């Protein structure tokens, strides 16, 4: 397992992009303020509000969710 906190979605350890991690069976826990970028590469996403999980789904599902768009993506 690799835990990556607020380091920017584009800055990953060398040779361990999302595809490489998946091929190796490595789970990446990504904590990121840039929700749009993080959800764009996420297999599974969780939306936390004041420490409570309020929504979960695939990255694609959460990117299309109207509540997520309004509250977290500024759309």
Image: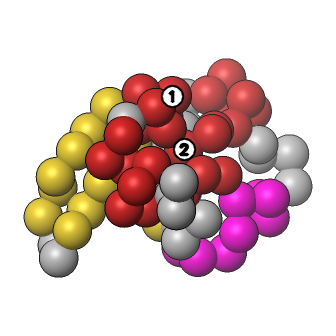
Q: Residue 59 appears at what percent x and percent y?
A: 48, 35
Marks 1 and 2, the one that precedes in the sequence: 2
Relative placement, left or right, of 52 versus 38 is: left
> Which residue ends up furthest to the top in the rendered image?
23
Depth order, front residue of 8/3? 8
> Which residue ends up furthest to the right in the rendered image?
14
Disc assigned to residue 60 = 1
Relative placement, left or right, of 8 versus 35 is: right
Q: Residue 5 appears at what percent x and percent y?
A: 53, 73
Label 1 secondary element: helix
Question: Which quadrant of the figure has residue 25?
Answer: top right
Q: Residue 1 appears at what percent x and percent y?
A: 48, 50
Q: Residue at x 21, y 68 (%)?
A: 49
Q: How is the image coloured?
A: secondary structure
Is 10 in the magenta?
yes
Q: Residue at x 17, y 76 (%)?
A: 50
Specify the segment rendered in magenta. Answer: 2-13
Question: Which quadrant of the figure has residue 22?
Answer: top right
> Where is mark 2, residue-wise?
39
């Amino acid at each position: 397992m690799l835990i990556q906190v607020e380091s920017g979605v584009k800055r990953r350890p060398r040779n361990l992009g999302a595809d490489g991690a998946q091929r190796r069976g490595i789970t990446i826990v990504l904590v990121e303020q840039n929700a749009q970028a993080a959800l764009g590469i996420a297999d599974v996403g969780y939306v936390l509000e004041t420490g409570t999980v309020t929504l979960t789904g695939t990255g694609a599902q959460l990117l299309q969710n109207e509540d997520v768009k309004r509250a977290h993506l500024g759309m």
